[in-house]
Amino acid sequence: MGIPRELKGSKLLLMGSKVFLEKKLPIEGASRIDEAMSRNMTILVAEALGACRLFQDYLNSKGYRNVVVGHAKSMRYNAGGWKTLQYGTDLKARERRMIEECDSAIVIWANSSGVIAENLEQLKNLGKPTFLYEYSTRTGATEVGWLDPGRTYDPYYGMKEYFRRRKQWQK
């Protein structure tokens, strides 16, 4: 049994690369966000530059209110004046906790970002249905589809997790 290929649960995470500076949300992602809104899912989104701001602007343009903006140390952007929640004291902790809290995710991954690759591995390992929009700012090439449980998004993920756990044990 693989990872479901549809949005599940009541909490949807919107996450993406800060270098994704397009002016319009990809239609494939927008249609899935529209589906989540029609189901009144709670939408978790961060406040970073790039894709997160684009997600926020889209939700705000639709007048959607069931949104939580997650942050680490400070709030940088909240387009809709939504509820905010601190998910840790640094960006890695914020992303990890938001991933743990969600039931499904939509991710914009630009230029094979290592940070997003690590998050994709975590989503995959937790079995969370994730719709992925891959984009290259250099070539304009896109790939769209559901997270592939057989694909390696971050070849160093296992090593990073080992050292993260080791650091926690030493505390």
Image: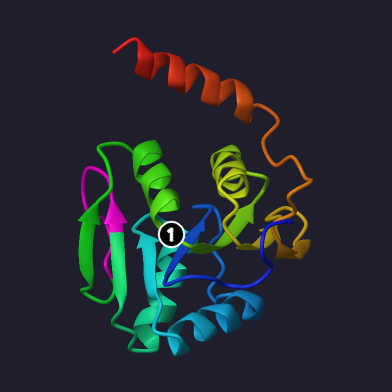
Tell me: 149 left or right of 80: right
The answer to whether residue 77 is magenta is: yes
All told, the count of numbered labels is: 1
Q: Amino acid at mark 1?
A: Cys
Q: Residue at x 54, y 44 (%)?
A: 119
Q: State the image quarter where residue 115 is shown.
A: top right
* Region rendered in magenta: 70-78
**The N terminus, quarter of image:** bottom right
Q: Secondary structure at mark 1?
A: loop
The answer to whether residue 132 is magenta is: no
Q: Residue at x 76, y 63 (%)?
A: 142
Name the residue nearer the viewer: 77 or 62: 62
**Residue lying farthest to the top in this orientation:** 170
Write down the residue under mark 1.
Answer: 102
Can you give x and y, in whole percent of width and height, for residue 85 in the image?
22, 56
Name the residue nearer the viewer: 48 or 152: 152
Question: With respect to residue 28, does 146 lie above or below?
Answer: above
Question: With respect to residue 132, does 19 lie above or below?
Answer: above
Can you give x and y, in whole percent of width and height, for residue 156 in the image?
65, 26
Q: Residue at x 63, y 48 (%)?
A: 124
Few, some or many C-alpha atoms within 10 Å of disc 1 (few <14, some 14-19, many ≥20)?
many
Can you give x and y, in whole percent of width and height, for residue 88 in the image?
27, 41
Name the residue nearer the viewer: 160 or 25: 160
Q: Magenta-highlighted stretch: main secondary structure? A: loop
**The C terminus, quarter of image:** top left
Name the residue nearer the viewer: 78 or 66: 66
Q: State the image quarter where residue 65 is shown.
A: bottom left
